C-alpha cells in the first residue's frame, strides 16, 4: 500500500508536529507533502523522509510570513498530486484536510478546524492584533476561507479528533462525525525528578509554557499572579513578548524559548503549571502532570479532558483574572500526590496513541475495501 502524509507547514516542533512525528514513526517510508518546510525546524524523524513543498516555499521571507499566505492555501493544497497513493493521512489545523486524493483512503487527523476562520477571528485578526483597517479587510477574506473549509469537509473518508472538544467543533463546522484519538505525550521522557533533595513545592514558582500569542491569554496568568503577589516564570516566545513584559514588570521572569530538556526541568521545579487560555487538547498540561506537577487551567476545551479538578490540578470557573487567581490560590494550598498526578498523564502515552491511531487507520481501510 502506497502511503502519503500531508501536514500544513513545518516551521517548528509544536503540538501538531509532535503528533506528526508519531505518525511518521508508524509510516517510516511515506513522503510528506507540506506548504512550507523550514529545514532543521522539526525532528530528525520528520526531516529524514522525502518532503514535497508547495509553491509557497519560493515566496519572499516565507519562513517568517507563512501565516500571511492563508488565502493561497486552498489553491496550493489542491495542487498536490496524490493520484498514486492508496492511503493519505492528513495532519490538519489549517487546509491540509482538503487535499484531493481521488483513489486513496483519506484519514484526517484534525487538530482543530481553522480557528481564525471560524470562531476566533478576533483573537487573531482583531483591531488590537492587526489594526482596525486590516481587521476590516481580513474579515471577508476569512469568511470566504471558512466557506471553502466547510465545502471541502467531505473530502476525508474519516476524521480523527485530538479531543472531545475538537470532535464537537468538527461536528459543528463540518457536519461530520469523528473518532477521538488523543495526541501522544512522551511520558517516558517527561517524568518526575529522581533528585530527592529538591526543594518543597511550596517554595517553587508557578510556570507558563506557551507561545506568546493573544489566544493563549498569558496576560491572565500574569494578572492572577500579581493579584496573589506570587512570582511567575514564563517559557516561550512570540509576538506578544513586549506587551507581556510591560504588563509583567519585575515579578515575572521571561525565559524565552527553551529546549525539551529545559522545559522538563522547569516542569519539575514549578509549584503549578498554568494554562489560562482555551486549548483544543494541550500537550503542556499533560507533560507537566507526567512530571508530577499539578495544573491550573481554565475549565474549558481540552483541559476538561486532561485535568482532574482537585486531584491533578484545579480548573478555573471562568476566564476572569479573579477566577484564575482563586484557582491558583486553591492549587498552592492543596497537597497533591505526585504519583496520582502522573498516573493521570499516563492515559495519554505514546504507546496508547500508536494503538488507537493504528486501529482507526485499519478500520478506515477495511471499510473502503468492504464497500468495493
Image (spheres, rainbow, N blue to C red):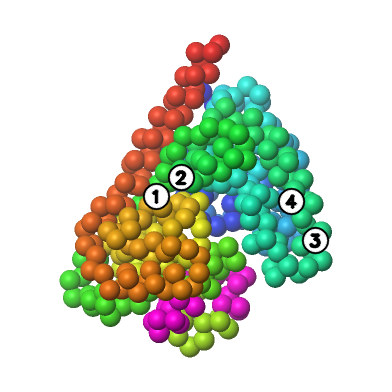
Left or right of 187, for residue 15: right
- Please say if the residues under marks 2 and 4 sit with CB atoms less than 8 Å apart: no
User: Where is residue 271 shown, x and y percent of the image?
Assistant: 32, 72
Left or right of 160, for residue 239: right
Q: Residues within 10 Å of mark 3 (few under 14, many from 20)?
A: some
Residue at the spot 54% in from the left edge and 64% down from the top edge = 216
Nearest the viewer among 73 and 81 is 73
**Label ID, residue 163:** 2
- Please say if the residues under marks 3 and 1 sit with CB atoms less than 8 Å apart: no
Mark 1 / mark 4, whichever is N-terminal: 4
Element under disc 2: loop
Is 98 placed above or below 368 here? Answer: below
**Label ID, residue 142:** 4
State the separation of the CA atoms marked 1 and 2.
Answer: 8 Å
User: Where is residue 34 shown, x and y percent of the image?
Assistant: 63, 44
Nearest the viewer among 205 and 12 is 205
Element under disc 4: helix
- Please say if the residues under marks 3 and 2 sit with CB atoms less than 8 Å apart: no
User: Where is residue 108 shown, x and y percent of the image?
Assistant: 55, 36
Q: Which residues are magenta?
A: 223-244
State the separation of the CA atoms marked 3 and 4.
Answer: 11 Å
Mark 1 / mark 2, whichever is N-terminal: 2
Element under disc 3: helix
> What residue sits right under mark 3 in the picture?
136
Mark 3 / mark 2, whichever is N-terminal: 3
Residue at the spot 70% in from the left edge and 70% down from the top edge = 128
- Please say if the residues under marks 1 and 2 sit with CB atoms less than 8 Å apart: yes
State the separation of the CA atoms marked 1 and 4.
Answer: 30 Å
Q: Residues within 10 Å of mark 1 (few under 14, many from 20)?
A: some
Amino acid at each position: 500500500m502506497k502511503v502519503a502524509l500531508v501536514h500544513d507547514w513545518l516551521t517548528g516542533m509544536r503540538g501538531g508536529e509532535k503528533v506528526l512525528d508519531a505518525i511518521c514513526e508508524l509510516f517510516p517510508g511515506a513522503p510528506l507533502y507540506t506548504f512550507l518546510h523550514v529545514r532543521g525546524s522539526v525532528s530528525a524523524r520528520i526531516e529524514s523522509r522525502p518532503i514535497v513543498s508547495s509553491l509557497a516555499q519560493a515566496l519572499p521571507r516565507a519562513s517568517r510570513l507563512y501565516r500571511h499566505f492563508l488565502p493561497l492555501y486552498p489553491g496550493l493544497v489542491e495542487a498536490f498530486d496524490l493520484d498514486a497513493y492508496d492511503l493519505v493521512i492528513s495532519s490538519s489545523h489549517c487546509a491540509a484536510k482538503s487535499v484531493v486524493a481521488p483513489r486513496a483512503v483519506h484519514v484526517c487527523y484534525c487538530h482543530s478546524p481553522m480557528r481564525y476562520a471560524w470562531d476566533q477571528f478576533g483573537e487573531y485578526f482583531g483591531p488590537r492584533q492587526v489594526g482596525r483597517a486590516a481587521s476590516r479587510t481580513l474579515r471577508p477574506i476569512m469568511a470566504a476561507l471558512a466557506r471553502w473549509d466547510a465545502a471541502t469537509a467531505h473530502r476525508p473518508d474519516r476524521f480523527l479528533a485530538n479531543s472531545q472538544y475538537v470532535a464537537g467543533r468538527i461536528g459543528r463546522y463540518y457536519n461530520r462525525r469523528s473518532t477521538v484519538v488523543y495526541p501522544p505525550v512522551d511520558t517516558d521522557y517527561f517524568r518526575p525528578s529522581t533528585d530527592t533533595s529538591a526543594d518543597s513545592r511550596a517554595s517553587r514558582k508557578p510556570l507558563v509554557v506557551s507561545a506568546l500569542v493573544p489566544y493563549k491569554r498569558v496576560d491572565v496568568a500574569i494578572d492572577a499572579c500579581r493579584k496573589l503577589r506570587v512570582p511567575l516564570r514564563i517559557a516561550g516566545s512570540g509576538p506578544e513578548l513586549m506587551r507581556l513584559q510591560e504588563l509583567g514588570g519585575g515579578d515575572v521572569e521571561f525565559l524565552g524559548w527553551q529546549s525539551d530538556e529545559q522545559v522538563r526541568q522547569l516542569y519539575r521545579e514549578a509549584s503549578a503549571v498554568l494554562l489560562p487560555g482555551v486549548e483544543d487538547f494541550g500537550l503542556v498540561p499533560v507533560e507537566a502532570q507526567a512530571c508530577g506537577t499539578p495544573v491550573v487551567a481554565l475549565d474549558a476545551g481540552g483541559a476538561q479532558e486532561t485535568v482532574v479538578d482537585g486531584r491533578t490540578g484545579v480548573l478555573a470557573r471562568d476566564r476572569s483574572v479573579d477566577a484564575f487567581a482563586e484557582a491558583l490560590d486553591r492549587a498552592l494550598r492543596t497537597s497533591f500526590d505526585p504519583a496520582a498526578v502522573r498516573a493521570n498523564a499516563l492515559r495519554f502515552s505514546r504507546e496508547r496513541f500508536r494503538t488507537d491511531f493504528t486501529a482507526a487507520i485499519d478500520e478506515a481501510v477495511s471499510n473502503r475495501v468492504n464497500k468495493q
